[in-house]
Every structure is written in structure tokens, then in C-alpha cells.
Image (tube, rainbow, N blue to C red):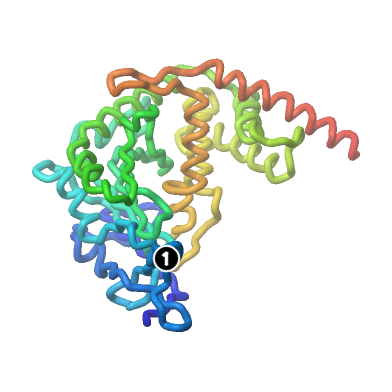
Amino acid sequence: MPKNTSKNKDHYISTNASWVSKDTVQEITFENAFPYEFERQPLYDANENHVSMNGTKWYGLTCSDTQEFTGKPIPESYQHLTNQRFWEIVQNAVGGTDAKVENVGTFKNRARRYITVALGTDMDQFYVGQREFKNRFCLLDSIDMSSSLYGVNTSVCIVCQNSFNAAMQDKSGLFRFKVRHSKNMIDGIENMEKGIESFIGVSKQFKHALQVAETVPVNREEASEAFTGWIMKDSKDKVMSTRTRNTVERLGNLFVTGAGNKGETLLDAFSAVTDYYSHESSGGQDKDGFRMKQNESSNFGAGNRAKQDFFKHLFTTPKTLEEKPAFNPTGFKNLREIGRKVEQETQNQIALAN
């Protein structure tokens, strides 16, 4: 019976050097992206009986190159995608175009994987003022029920390498494809393969939001209040912890001194948040010069969710691809009001303690 592996087998390859890793390849192919395949294996108990709960048999997935289990056990009904099929989804979606695969990586010991693609359109690269952005399509998936298959539009600011997954969707899911690992998965995949134009539309919406943000004046005090209010809005505490105060101070510094920032606009405030949660929130290098933990958080975990949450408080959500996001002054004002009260309470507590 295959064994559970204790060694992390995650990998990352790219055609461009980045803050994640400086190692590059000239071209990404299926062979160098996924030099192994997943194989479904029955799970047995101590008596060598196939594990079954409530009539459902359970399985594990092994990697063909190590013959070791990876990820969590899965029920018989769970439809996992092979690496070959995962790769084919991207090829079917962008086949016949100038699209190029730029990054492939895995997380959680290969249980999660992603492919990033330059679509070869005029939205692959755009400018907002003096800031250059690269826009990419990203397909993400898991093999152990930890995530659905989904595609997002991701943008990277070149001067600071901050990333943001633009998923400005309404409840219809129009702007972010998400497919559950169920018996109807094939139909969802076919819709995803046909819907690449939607991602180009989202790119244009995100560019417009950034252009709007550059025109909204914000000073250091206003930004600090907004940062505080945003972090503390769901907290039952009325005062900031030392850790929260340090985070707010760091965001305030990035607002002024972060790459490309001048501490003058809403775009500087948004860039401060994307800077912190892209590069600093989860620590430094953690695997042979790679920053896998920070990369995972920034693009698929807590860091990504934080950036999305801040964005939604600053802008309205479009209901169609033709509608453009607008600045939400009420949302920004509410954050500042919460932040102002928390900062005052915190200062009062510090004064009493002294």
C-alpha cells in the first residue's frame, strides 16, 4: 500500500523571473509542468477492508513518480481532474490564439495547482498613470476537495510586483468561472473553455477601477483611518492589539513609500494593501529560495481574500461586463469612521496604561 509522504513535493516553474523564484525555463510544456500523474487508490483499514462510510467508499490519490499519497482522502463520487485534463482545459480555452503559458505551480504538497497564461491581447499590458500592469488569466484547482476548479483574471503591477485577482462578479458568477468536482463537472468545464472573452472584459473593468482610484485624493490621516477601520470592522474589540497597530503603521508607510506610491490618492492606499498582502503578510523564503507560503497566501489564500475585501469596500460591483466599477465614497467613509473611533479608543487605553 502507498505511504503518506512527509516531504513536500511542491514545485514552481516560470518563463519570467519573479519575486517567487528567479529560476526560469524558455518554454512551459505539459512535460515540464507536470512530470507526474495522479492515480486513484482504494483506502484500506487495519483489517484490509476497503474504507467505507455510510455506503460510500473512500480513495486516496498517489503521485506516479513517488507512489506516495498526497492531499486528503476523497469519496467515490468525487471527480478529480488528472494533470493532463487540467492542462487541456487551458489549451482548449486559448487554442489558436497567441496565448502563452507563463507560470505553473503547486501548493499543499501538490494537492492544489495553477496555470497562469498571457492571453496575447491588448489587455496583457496596460498603464495607469506611470504604473505598468501585466494582466493574466489564471486557472486553479485542487485534487482533494479543498477547492473547486476556477478561473480568475489576475493583474500584477510591475514596479512593485503586487498582484490582484480581479473577480468582480455578481451572484450569477458571470465574471469568475467556478466548477465543482461533481457529476456535472464536464458541462461546467466546457462553458469555461468557451468563456475566455469574459476575462478580457474583467481586465478592462479592473483597469477602469484603477484609473478612477488615481483621481480620488487621499491623505495619510485618511488612509490610516481607512486601514484601521478595514482591519477592525468585524472585530468585537474596541481597541487595536499591538500586532494590528504595527500592521496599520506598515500600511501607512507603504501608502507613502511603497514602490510607485506618493501617499496622495486612493490608488496609493489600494497599492499599500496589495503590497503588504502580496509580499509581507506571510513571511519570507520558506523553501530553497522560493516564497511558496507567501505566494500561496497572496494568490489563493488569506492574502488574496484580504485584497479582494479591501477592493470591494472601495468600489461598486458591476452587474454586467459592459458596466464599469465606480468609486464607493460611502464605503470608504464608513471605513474611516470605524477607524477613527478605534484609533481614539486605542489612544485612550494607552494613556490610561501610562
Q: Residue lying furthest left in this view?
A: 96
Q: Quadrant of residue 161?
A: top left
Find residue 196 and report its image quarter: top left
Q: Residues within 10 Å of mark 1 (few under 14, many from 20)?
A: some
| In the rendered image, the vertical position of residue 148 relative to residue 167, given as above or below | below
Which kind of residue does numbered mark 1 sit on?
A: Pro
Vertical placement of 3 versus 81: above or below? below
Q: Between 23 and 318, which is closer to the camera in this rendering?
A: 318
Res 134 seen here:
no
In the rendered image, residue 240, in percent from the top left (x then y), is placed at: 73, 38
121 displayed left or right of 215: left
Residue 222 lies, with reference to residue 346, above or below; the image says above
Identify whether 144 is placed above or below 234: below
| Of 72 and 101, the residue lying toward us | 72
Residue at 38% x, 27% y: name it: 170
Query: Residue shown at 55%/37% (left/top)?
Result: 254
Residue 311 in the image, given as x and y percentages of width and height: 48, 30
Residue at 35 percent across and 73 percent down: it is: 42
**Left or right, residue 354 beside residue 23:** right
The answer to whether residue 339 is seen in the rendering is yes
Tell me the SS state at disc 1: strand
Which quadrant would the N terminus be assigned to in this image?
bottom left
Q: Which quadrant is home to the C terminus? A: top right
Q: Residue at x 53, y 43 (%)?
A: 276
The x, y position of residue 32, in whole percent, is 23, 65
Q: Where in the figure is residue 69, as x and y percent of width and height?
A: 39, 73
Left or right: where 219 falls relative to 6: right
Provide the residue designation for mark 1.
73
Q: Is residue 220 left or right of residue 312?
A: right
Q: Nearer the viewer, residue 219 or 277?
A: 277
